[in-house]
């Protein structure tokens, strides 16, 4: 099984990093995640766009 990775930009510090994406069969999905740079909490929203996994990060206050 191949693991896909997606880039995410932190809504607090605006740094970009990669995270492992859920399988297409598990989408759409939301995940609580801490930024790998500034450690602030965020929500990662994963969706499928024409068979490709996309991720968007939002702060807890958004």
Image (tube, helix red, strand yellow):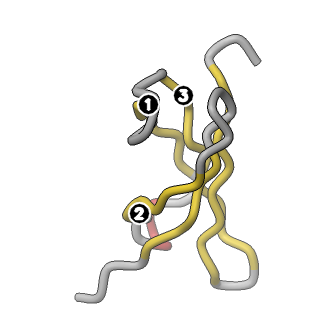
- Residue 22's disc is 2
Total numbered circles: 3
Q: Disc 3 vs disc 2: which is toward the camera? A: 3
Q: Are marks 1 and 3 in contact (CB under 8 Å)?
A: yes
Label 2 Cα crowd, 10 Å radius (few <14 / some 14-19 / many 20+) = some
| Residue 33 as seen in the image, left or right of residue 52 | left
Q: What secondary structure is marked by label 3?
A: strand
Q: Disc 1 vs disc 3: which is toward the camera? A: 3
Q: Are marks 3 and 2 in contact (CB under 8 Å)?
A: no
Q: Disc 2 vs disc 1: which is toward the camera? A: 1
What is the quadrant of residue 47 in the picture? bottom right
| Residue 52 as seen in the image, left or right of residue 24 | right
N-terminal of the pair, mark 3 or mark 2, is: 2
C-alpha gap between disc 1 and disc 3: 6 Å
Q: Name the residue furthest left.
A: 1
Q: Name the residue furthest top.
A: 61
Residue drawn at 58 percent across, 54 percent down:
16
What is the quadrant of residue 31 in the picture? top left
Q: Position of residue 17 (x, y in %)?
A: 49, 57
Residue drawn at 44 percent across, 73 percent down:
5
Label 3 Cα crowd, 10 Å radius (few <14 / some 14-19 / many 20+) = many
Q: Position of residue 46 (x, y in %)?
A: 59, 55
Residue at which label 3 appears: 42
Quadrant including the N terminus: bottom left
Q: Position of residue 37 (x, y in %)?
A: 43, 39
Residue drawn at 43 percent across, 30 percent down:
32
Q: Position of residue 62 (x, y in %)?
A: 76, 18
Residue at which label 1 appears: 32
């Amino acid at each position: 099984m191949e693991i896909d990775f997606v880039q995410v930009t932190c809504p607090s510090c605006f740094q970009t990093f990669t995270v492992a994406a859920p399988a297409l069969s598990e989408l759409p999905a939301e995940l609580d995640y801490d930024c790998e740079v500034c450690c602030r909490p965020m929500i990662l929203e994963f969706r499928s766009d024409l068979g490709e996994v996309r991720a968007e990060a939002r702060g807890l206050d958004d």
